[in-house]
Amino acid sequence: MPLITAPVIAPPDPPNTPPATQIPEVGYSSVTYIDPTGTRWPMTDLTADWYTLAEGVSGLGAAPYVLTSDPHPRGGARLRHVQPQPRTIIWPVLVKGSDHTSFTDNWRALGRAFTRTLHEGPGTLEIARPNGRIRQIRVYYQEGWDGQGRTATGITWDSAVLTLWCEDPYYVDAAPVSVHRETGALVDYLVPYPSVSSSQVLGATTVMNPGDVDVWPTWTITGPATLITFIREDTGESFALDMTETSHGALLSGETVTISTDPPSVRSATGDNWIGALNWPQAVLWSLPPGGCPVTFQLDGSGPGSAVDLTFYPRYEMA
């Protein structure tokens, strides 16, 4: 059966990107903070009423790790486990205003944009390069929104040194990578000559992860399909979703189901929970390592319109 494969890596243009400036550990870039409400706060526009003080920025380099080792009888040790740790970013900011009232309004508004992460979910620090590539990291306010307390500060200007805490230490590409596979046209057995069209979509391909560390993809399957199987060929890990084990039954033409590998979930387009239809305990919701990874998609009971879409956001050590 003909198959169509279309890997896509296409970053969007950064919206309302502030002017670029030199940031330690990053280089020439534009930085925007996005608060939990989605409001964008440009952080590198030196003409604005607030901007980053580049001197003192830290925590944008490689992720921190804890190494676990075992003593070796012949001396030294052997590495047993590597555990990524939460990242801490130090972010100095200057805030000003044309008079005391406007300064106070700006100070309170920006401070609230950071501290609300403790109550409404993480904000996002977005770092855009001049070529349009964007990496993001989710942040929580930890401490530091205090004035300097020096002579002349707190009237029309002041600065704060923020500590931002990141539960995931890796930067994430703002643009997803996607792979689409679908059935080709089914053929008549006798026209124009004896032919066979399988009831399966069998697709072996190599998925490229351009990031630095593993990612856990999301899969969206479009019916018709009865049994959906995904195999990581280099490790043999696999998982399968048997639609006949759900209350819905076979996935019909145009219907979709989405499988998330982290956190694990299986949801229909209407929100029904079908995670129990995975082939537990054999199921392994595997990740994609950096570089190329051989994978196979298989849909039993497929037909016209059957398709598989794999999506993930590459993760990076550094901004």
Image (cartoon, rainbow, N blue to C red):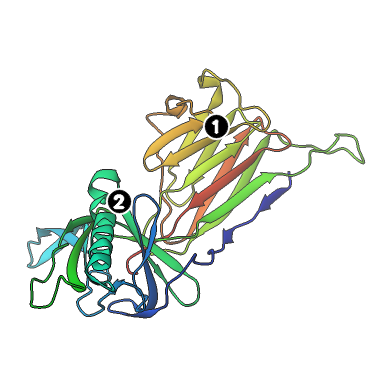
Secondary structure of residue under mark 2: loop
Label drawn at residue 122: 2
Would residue 82 be found to the left or right of residue 222 on screen? Answer: left
Q: Quadrant of residue 75?
A: bottom left
* Classed neighbour count for the residue bearing mark 1: other residues with Cα under 10 Å, few (<14), some (14–19), many (≥20): few
Label drawn at residue 247: none
Label drawn at residue 269: 1
Q: How many marks?
A: 2
Which residue shows up at 55% across the image and 54% down it? Answer: 178
Which residue shows up at 91% across the image and 38% down it? Answer: 191
Secondary structure of residue under mark 1: loop
Look at the picture and state if 278 lies above or below 307.
Answer: above
Depth check, front residue: 162 or 306: 162
Look at the picture and state if 196 lies above or below 117.
Answer: above
Which residue shows up at 29% across the image and 74% down it? Answer: 98
Q: Earlier in the sequence, mark 1 or mark 2?
A: 2
Q: Are marks 1 and 2 in contact (CB under 8 Å)?
A: no
Look at the picture and state if 245 lies above or below 174.
Answer: above
Task: List x then y, in percent, for residue 291.
Answer: 45, 63
Would residue 236 be found to the left or right of residue 257 on screen? Answer: left
Circle 2: residue type: Pro
